Structure formats: structure tokens, C-alpha cells
Image (spheres, grey):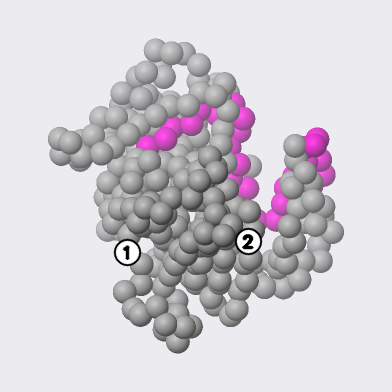
Amino acid sequence: AVFHVTDQLGNKITDESLILYIQQALCASRGGISKEVRLCPGRNVTPGLKDLALEMTSKDRPGLVSEISAVLVELGCNITTAVAWTHGTRAASIFYVEDGLEGGPITDPIRLAHVQEQLENVVKAHHEEGEKWSVRLTTPAGGHTHKERRLHQLMYADEDYESCRGCDGSGSSAHKKGCDRTHVYIESCKEKGYWIVNVRSRDRPKLLFDTVCALTDLQYVVFHAVVASRGTLADQEYFVRHKDGYTSNKESERHKLTLCLIAAIERRISQGLMLDLCAKNRMGLLSDMTRVFRENGLSMSRIEIGTR
């Protein structure tokens, strides 16, 4: 595979330490990343290997994160990392926590059960009977999936893609060139036994990651791919086949793949104002910040919190 990459400003990468970081990150399974280059420029929101993960899905509503973080503070849990996405009417979040008094992992099963029960009460309180929601605790022994990959999995399991709609405009080349909404077209290549998946959308960081996550979670194997960006738009073409070797001709499966790709691309898109805040870390900081947002009538569409 060959990747042509730039930094977030579109400039050529010349920082030797960053280049070394990329090289070692791609080969992490061969021996890990050296201490000298672990702090890559940008946000560092990697959870600790011993942190407890709290995973939640629910319908989106103002004040949800504020209530969850306040309950965790009351239970003596210190939030070390947190990520949350909203898409349509649904929300998914992951909080990594440690013992707020002594530090380190929370291992007492009675305390863990109490934490889960209290979080379930918060989430369940705003749902009608039969509405979907979930709260799950993952202990350190279970390991951690990449946090954003896990968010994709949570929202897919929550079936947020069911409310997705692609562009309603015509499929002509002229329309696609002038439209920055997400377009997905799937053709069948009977000679090779592949599906040819074409995706056009607005270009942005992590677009390739989000698309491949969707294909992987749906059990598709990519045999060939071409990705290119032109101005503000990106074109992606994938030749895929289901991992068991077959390619279905069912329109329902083609439709589901289309919706899941649109959802994976749109989950990270936000029309709101982005706020970057750096402060001295302390227990309850996230609870205090989110309470201010709630009291001023502001909703949060995405959250990324880290400590270092």
C-alpha cells in the first residue's frame, strides 16, 4: 500500500520525530513505539491500559454527559479519558476511569456493580419502555479496542444507520461534482466476484479510517482500493467481497452496506463550534465543564477528553 499524506494544514511533513512516530506506529506489533517519540504532536487521548472502560449507548439529549460525569464523581471515579459521538437521535460514549482516591484500576466487584447500576439509572431514566439503551463495563483484563473504532462498533450495534439517507439528487456526474453530501454507489463485478463500492464525500481527516471500519465491521474484505482527494471532495473506490468468499446479490444487503457507509462517514461530522480547552487536571473537571454547557442551553455533539 502507498499513502500520500500531509499534516492537518495540508503541508508536507518534515518533522523527523513525527515521521519516526508514524513508522513505529505502523510497525507497533514488531516491538512497540520508543519512549522518545510516544508524544506525537496533537491531542493525546489514549486511555491507560489499566483503566476501566464504561461504554454507553442511548438516545441523544441535552445534559446527558453532564449527568454521567457527575454520577462518576459522586462514586469516586476519576475520568482519565472520554470520547462521545452523536448521530441523528442516537449517542454513544466511552469513559475510561480509575479510582479517584487511590489511583489505579477499580477491581472490587461490588463497587463495579454499584457503578454500573447507578449509570443504568441515569441512562434509563429518559427512555420509554422498549427504547434501546445500553451500559457496559469492560475491565482491564479484557483489553481495549481503539476508542474510535469501538465507537463505530457501538453505534453500528445501536443501528444508528437506519435513519441515514444519502443525497436525494440525481446520480449524474455533474451533480456529484457540485454536491458535497455523501454519495455511495455499489456495482457488482460478476467476473471477479466482487462488489465495487464507490464513495464520494467531503474530504476530512480520518475519512479513510471511518470507511474501512464500516467495511470491516460488516465482515467485508478489501482486495483493491483507490482513494484520492480533489479540493474539498474525496473519492474512494473499493473492490470488496464478504469474508466467507461470497458476494450476495440481495438488494437488502447492498442497501444496508450503503447506509452503514453513510453513517460511518457522518458520525464524525459536526456543524457546531469547536472548543479546545487545556487546564490543570483534577477530579470532577469534566463534570464542572459540562454543567456549564448544560446550564447555558448548549448541546455537545462530540467530545474528546484526555489527560497527560
| Labels 2 and 1: the sequence-earlier one | 1
Q: Residue at x 78, y 56 (%)?
A: 18
Residue furthest front as drawn: 191
Asked which quadrant contains residue 226, the reply is: bottom right
List the residue tagged with mark 1: 165
Q: Residue at x 55, y 54 (%)?
A: 193
x, y (%) of residue 62? 28, 51
Circle 2 — which element? Answer: strand
Circle 1 — which element? Answer: loop
Residue 52 is covered by the magenta coloring? yes
What residue type is disc 2 on? Ala
Q: Is residue 117 left or right of residue 49?
A: left
Magenta-highlighted stretch: main secondary structure?
loop
What residue type is disc 1 on? Arg
51 shown above or below 11: above
Which dot marks residue 122? none
On the question of residue 82 being in view, the answer is: no
Q: Which residues are magenta?
A: 30-56
The residue nearer to you, when weighing 123 against 102, is 123
Q: Quadrant of the C terminus?
A: top right
Which dot marks residue 225? 2
The residue nearer to you, when weighing 159 against 283, is 159
Residue at mark 2 to residue at mark 1: CA–CA distance: 24 Å
